Image: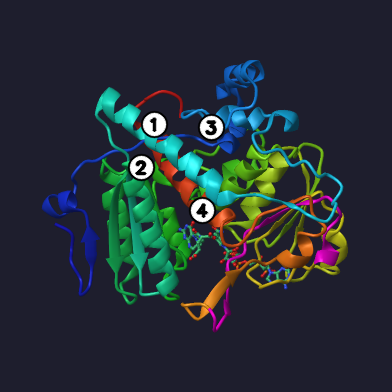
Amino acid sequence: MVNARTHFVLHCPKYQKSRMASLALTDTSSSATARLFPFRRRNGVLLLRHLVGPLPRPPPTPLRPLTAVHPSNALYPVVSAAGDGSAKVIDGKMVAKQITEEVASEVSRMKAAIGVVPGLAVVLVGDRKDSATYVRKKKKACESVGINSFDVHLPADSPEDEVIKFISGFNDDPSVHGILVQLPLPPHMDEENVLNAVSIEKDVDGFHPVNIGRLAMRGREPLFVPCTPKGCIELLHRYGVQIKGKKAVVIGRSNIVGMPAALLLQREDATVSIVHSRTKNPEAITKQADIVISAVGQPNMVKGSWIKPGAVVIDVGINPVEDAKSRRGYRLVGDVCYEEASKVASAITPVPGGVGPMTIAMLLSNTLSSAKRANNFGNH
Ligand SMILES: NC(=O)C1=CN([C@@H]2O[C@H](COP(=O)(O)OP(=O)(O)OC[C@H]3O[C@@H](n4cnc5c(N)ncnc54)[C@H](OP(=O)(O)O)[C@@H]3O)[C@@H](O)[C@H]2O)C=CC1
Ligand SMILES: Nc1nc(=O)c2c([nH]1)NC[C@@H]1CN(c3ccc(C(=O)N[C@@H](CCC(=O)O)C(=O)O)cc3)C=[N+]21
């Protein structure tokens, strides 16, 4: 049994009986992954779509073929290209729901075929309210698609090696296909040490340096792509936004969002600039972009005047701002001033309801992928 400290919680009845209990998972790799594994792309579905005309919803299983969707065949094409004053809303909540349904159907197909159920372990250290909320959301999302979830909650003052011990246990457990260490970790912990402990085969967050390194290198393929940037690219694909040959600006260069988002865009043949806190004249640089991805954490920093008319704007920022009218006393806004930017852009993601739900959908998809790969089941 796991070494229990003060308020350590392990949520999984099966796990409580036997720490090394076995569970299992499933995959619906996204189109971004498809792009990274081009030889696995299947174009049959695209062809079919030509024959039957536009579908009200994507087919239940593969996400990959959508990678290759030409703008004119996209499910929700961005039509107003010239910035005519009313941007199309890129509905991340709706797309995430579709992906979640696709994952659910693959989870049951795999369970029926080989009796394996995907499993995701989430490690939470400390008592940050926002982290606890995200972990709850992830757990609920797993339940909704039939993925087993194991969560470990350790006190903020836990020693680093205790967290690593749990990670090692999950690494060795064949019923766990994905391990996520909720960030940020308490300040006394070395994030690099902790993330390095996650086996790259189970690194569904895509934060292991080997996965990031492969993402950065030509001709190398990461086993997993970080969920938030992958969700951004998936939205662009599903809305038929062409990336190849376009100018893209990513605002922010964090390891978990900005930097991998820039790498992904570059792999998709965009010409990418990165704006960060030391960048001179970020407005002028951003204004050149056909595609803007903002991941800064500054409410309403990106004004309408920063956006080129007709650009596509993906706002990753999740920023609480005081709001006495809201039940919670605050509301969430993005990095982009939505009011202004939506008058100039051709398409824009809202906050909430944009990238956030996609992050969770991509986590489910990566977990499914991992379980498929571990069990040599279908395409992963
Ligand atoms: N929707 C989702 O699923 C997710 C949303 N988020 C949200 O995305 C935002 C960014 O998160 P994260 O990447 O973790 O944040 P970090 O704080 O790790 O990184 C912020 C980045 O923005 C840059 N930056 C800060 N201020 C400015 C400025 N004034 N001008 C230009 N660049 C600036 C920083 O530059 P420098 O490197 O020079 O310091 C840094 O690279 C947050 O609001 C977070 O809540 C995060 C993860 C998932
Ligand atoms: N190891 C690790 N992996 C992460 O992926 C990770 C992390 N640590 N630490 C924190 C950030 C943040 N993050 C979000 C996930 C979902 C929403 C989300 O679902 N947002 C909704 C609802 C927001 C609400 O109403 O609370 C929305 O934007 O519509 C937001 C943000 C993942 N992160």
Identify the amino acid type marked 1.
Answer: Glu
Q: Is residue 231 visible?
A: yes
Q: Residue at x 24, y 41 (%)?
A: 23
For the view shown, which residue lies furthest in the bottom direction?
Answer: 324
Q: Earlier in the sequence, mark 3 or mark 4?
A: 3
Whether the magenta-drawn stretch holds residue 12 is answered as no
Q: Ligand 2 within 8 A of label 4's CB?
A: yes
Provide the residue designation for mark 3.
63
Q: State how many labels appear.
A: 4
Q: Residue at x 58, y 35 (%)?
A: 31
Provide the residue designation for mark 4.
357
> Above or below — where is 148 with respect to 117?
below
Q: Position of residue 336 (x, y in %)?
A: 71, 65
Q: Is residue 251 left or right of residue 23?
A: right
- Tell me which image quadrant ligand 1 sits in: bottom right
Q: CA distance from mark 2 to mark 3?
A: 16 Å
Q: Earlier in the sequence, mark 3 or mark 1?
A: 3
Q: Secondary structure at mark 1?
A: helix
Provide the residue designation for mark 2.
145
Q: Position of residue 276 (x, y in %)?
A: 73, 66
Q: Residue at x 81, y 48 (%)?
A: 290
Q: Secondary structure at mark 2?
A: helix
Provide the residue designation for mark 1.
106
> How has the structure been colored for display?
rainbow
